[in-house]
Structure formats: C-alpha cells, structure tokens
Image (spheres, rainbow, N blue to C red):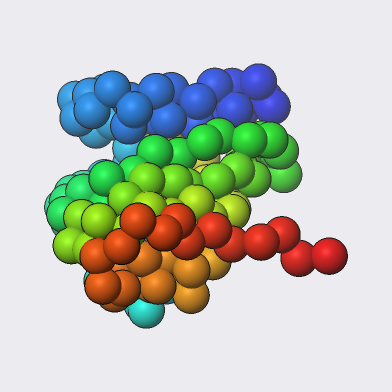
Amino acid sequence: MNTESVIDVVQRVYAALAAGDVQALAELTDPDVEIFQSELLPYGGYHRGLSGLQTFLEGVRTALDSQIEVGQLFVAGDRVVQIGRSHGTARATGVAFDVPEVQVWKVYDGRILGLTVYLDDSALLAALTAEPAAAVVRAKPQS
C-alpha cells in the first residue's frame, strides 16, 4: 500500500472508534489482529483476533471514559505511528487524566493487523487507583 492508503486506514479506524462504529471497525481489522498494551493496566496485555480486540475495547470502556487526541501520524513501511494524547476520566475513581501516548499500527492489505500502545502507565494507573478527587493526573513532557 502507498503512504496515503496506509494512513487512510488508520484514520478510518480512529473515526470508527470515535463514532462507536463496531461494524466499520470490524471491516477495517484483520481477523488475526494482535494488540498489546502494558500488562500493568487492568485491560492491558496481549490480545489476538477479533474476539481479543473486543475484549481489549470492552476493558478500556469499563475502566475509562476516554478520548484519543490524534496528533502526528508517521508512516514507516507497513506501520503508522501516531503521537498524541489520551484524556478522560477513570470510571472507578472519577479522577481525570491526560497522558501522552504513542500508538504503532501495522497495516496489511488495507486492514489493521497489529496495534501496540505506549503511554505513561504510571500517570494512568494513578488515575485508575486514586481515591475519588477533583485533581487531574497529567503527565509532564520529558525534557
């Protein structure tokens, strides 16, 4: 796929996620998709296949009311790297969070074959495990 096509697939995935369009997301995802996020998070770990994607997304929705702020997108072969932020509220504690993140998407034949998510686990864990409070947990950029 060319650079524009690979980015287009990822942008359509972000649009489907934002709209809650499960059908579009399924159509854009390879049945053998592999997803990884830190095991430190309650929904983290390794997930495989469409059922793994569903488990991952349900875990995120159960733990967080969150939005992805898509920042810059870079293409490296069959991968798209997104540098942005994740912000929202931890459902169990009511604590807001705003953390930097990097998502690495692997695209094959017009579909998502892989996703690895990197973010500030400690800041997100602080929001997930804190006593309910009005404070916002914000990760500060490294100098």
Quadrant (top left, top right, bottom left, bottom right) of the C terminus: bottom right
**Residue 135: image x %, image y %?**
41, 59
The residue closer to the viewer here, 130 or 37, is 130
Residue 143 seen in render:
yes
Outermost residue, front side: 134
The residue closer to the viewer here, 120 or 47, is 120
Image height check: is 103 above or below 69?
A: below
Outermost residue, bottom side: 40
128 horizontally vs 116: left or right: left
20 horizontally vs 142: left or right: left
**Residue 64: image x %, image y %?**
27, 52
Q: Looking at the image, how many numbered discs can be counted on the residues?
A: 0
Q: Residue at x 66, y 61 (%)?
A: 140
Quadrant (top left, top right, bottom left, bottom right) of the N terminus: top right
Residue 47 seen in render:
no
The residue closer to the viewer here, 23 or 138, is 138
Q: Residue at x 31, y 73 (%)?
A: 130
The residue closer to the viewer here, 137 or 5, is 137
**Residue 69: image x %, image y %?**
52, 36
105 horizontally vs 80: left or right: left
Q: Quadrant of residue 80?
A: top right
Q: Quadrant of residue 38?
A: bottom left
**Residue 42: image x %, image y %?**
26, 71
Q: Quadrant of residue 27?
A: top left
Q: Residue at x 35, y 56 (%)?
A: 134
